[in-house]
Amino acid sequence: MLRIRNLYAYYGSVTALSGVTCHIKEGEIVALIGANGAGKTTLLNAICGLVRKKGEVAFQGREVGRTPAERLVGLGISQVPEGRQLFAPMTVAENLELGAYLRYGREIRAEIARDLERVFHLFPVLKERQGQQAGTMSGGEQQMLAIARALMARPKLLLLDEPSLGLAPLVVENILATISRLKEEGMTILLVEQNARAALKVAARAYVLETGRIILSGSAQDLLADRQVTRAYLGRDYKEFTEGR
Amino acid sequence: MRQPEFEAISPEELELLQLERLQSTLTRAYRQVKFYRRRFDEAGLTPESIQTLADLARLPVTTRGDLSENYPYGLFALPLKDIVRIISSPGTTDRPLVVGYSSQDVKLWLELLARLYTAAGVTPEDIVQLVIPPGLANWRRDLMAGAEYLGASVIPAATLNFAKELMVMRDYKTSVLVTTPPLARHLIAVMDRMGLTPAELSLRKALLVAAPLSSPVRQEIEAGLQVKVATAYGITEVMGPGLAYSCTADQGFHFSADHFYPEIIDPRTGMVLPPGEEGELVITTLSTVAFPLVRFRSGDLTFLNPSPCPCGRTLVRLGEIRGRVDDIFSVGGIKVHPEQAGRLLQDLLGGHPPKFRWQVATEEGLEVLDLELTVEEDFFSDEIKALEGLCRKVRRHFQDHLGVPARLTLKEIEAR
């Protein structure tokens, strides 16, 4: 579905990605893991056309490297940004409608209303809180709203940036379950997570980024068992492995 | 097919998979192995320089000599605490060959072996008997583990004499024999002597490994054991067997190109040759973590056949192994360099440089290294006993060091 080849991304004069090649197949959940500053979010932003970049990005066989961000949403790529970026003073329903803004005028409202029902079915709590201001909800609910808002654009590929950030473990479980459910519905997901263990639980495959390059890739199961990954990204202490040796 | 998503992958998908794996392998090698960093730097390249698979040809090759110079751990890309297996084999230089595996590498290797067995038509219902000499310890262990992983009933290699091996084969109802071409021929000779016919056995397949198989020998074995023969190609430096394997169509070896990238080069100029042309096989690992190899020169002469295979696998095939680019030769599947033989003889002659000739002889199928040593005054003894002792020592020394059966004949010094 998505093929990336020799992708470079820059923030000013700083090179944040230096030649990344990777792919995502339809219906897959792929995780990107790596330390802070490795380039995970940059990769998502580069896919979405939000940073200056060089290289090939092909979405459904079509080169989209130069396509502007707003047109990419129309093509079927939606990002749920880190920190949710909701419109806090607006209601839940209004936030969701904004997610479908590209579709207004193009499609009949009934279509959008149907999608709203689908999203409510996925997140019943949002239905209950339709009229509530987004900013007054809990972190987990806000995250669900952010995902729901992205779904309103009817994406084919969903890019999730740190969906578990700042959430309590139980809420994280909940978000993970939502991600798995989306996959069951056929959604293709690229998941960036600081919480690598959580990401590897729901993803089938993962790429490990280190200073702008992919240094390892493999099935999530293999990477969970990989000692280097465990040490570097799963929060285990180095000592745990060296003590008693 | 064990893994159709990879073994029958489309060429476009494979190309991208190879490129992303290659780039991450080169990044790891460059960041974690001093040797590769130096090599890349000397060539004025970084991992970023490699943007297509064809760019790989810009990187320098790695030789057995490099492996020997970086003995033992110089080419490992992981700290030892992450290494779960360190294998060694006599190698073909004066130092053993060392290869490290991480737990992920071990898993990959098992999966590749399962592919090999599946392609050979072996199933979990089979009873697999291994008859592999101790000198091929790595093949022995690998093929046993792979058959177990597949779920077959495995009879590991034992140190039985051949008549007993055949008795086991008959009585345990072995359906798949895993052995080397010379040993298969020898088993047929022993069967003849015992009056045992293939009809009394339950064999249906023979997987012949570790040495090239010529087509007359293959026909001889198929007829002698009444089996279908499958083969595989592998080198210890690159995960051993499982690297490439034959299928039911049986025209060459499918190369596990999703995990290893093959190139064929002109051994003299180093230029990459187009598919179909014969040259030296050069291998780059794409997935192994502990011991990445960048453009490793195998020394084997072969060619790549990208044409579609009737079996449905899309993985490129290696043609038959047509020979070596160096002087390394095989005795019953064990690789020997003439210099190694020279060094061993020199040891036994108290440091005196030997004048000798060698050839690989066949005795009832078994391969023996025949050494003909020119007797010189320095170590000439009138005593027959002493000379006999030397012959005995040579036999033992070669068995000890290389696992190779050897025979010494002495040649008188020519009259001046």
Image (cartoon, coloured by chain):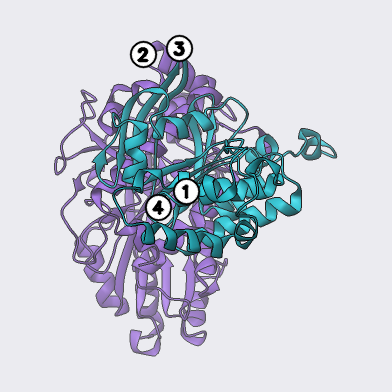
Chain colours: A cyan, B purple
Q: Quadrant of the N terminus of chain B?
A: bottom left
- Who's the residue at 43% across and 18% down the image? A10
Mark 1 → mark 4, Cα distance in angstroms: 12 Å
Closer to viewer: mark 2 or mark 1: 1
> Could you say which quadrant of the image residue A233 lies in?
top right
Circle 4 sits in a helix, a strand or a loop, which is it? loop
Mark 2, residue position: B43
Q: Give the residue displayed 20% in from the left and 44% down from the top.
A: B303
Mark-to-mark CA distance, 2 and 4: 49 Å
Q: CA distance from mark 2 to mark 1?
A: 57 Å
The amino acid sitting under disc 4 is Arg
Q: Which mark is residue A12?
A: 3
Q: Secondary structure at mark 1?
A: helix
Residue at the far right in the pictured view: A244
The answer to whether residue B342 is seen in the rendering is no
In contact (CB < 8 Å): disc 3 and disc 2: no
Q: Which is closer to the viewer, label 3 or label 1?
A: 1
**With respect to residue B149, does B375 lie above or below?**
above
On the same chain, marks 2 and 4? The answer is no
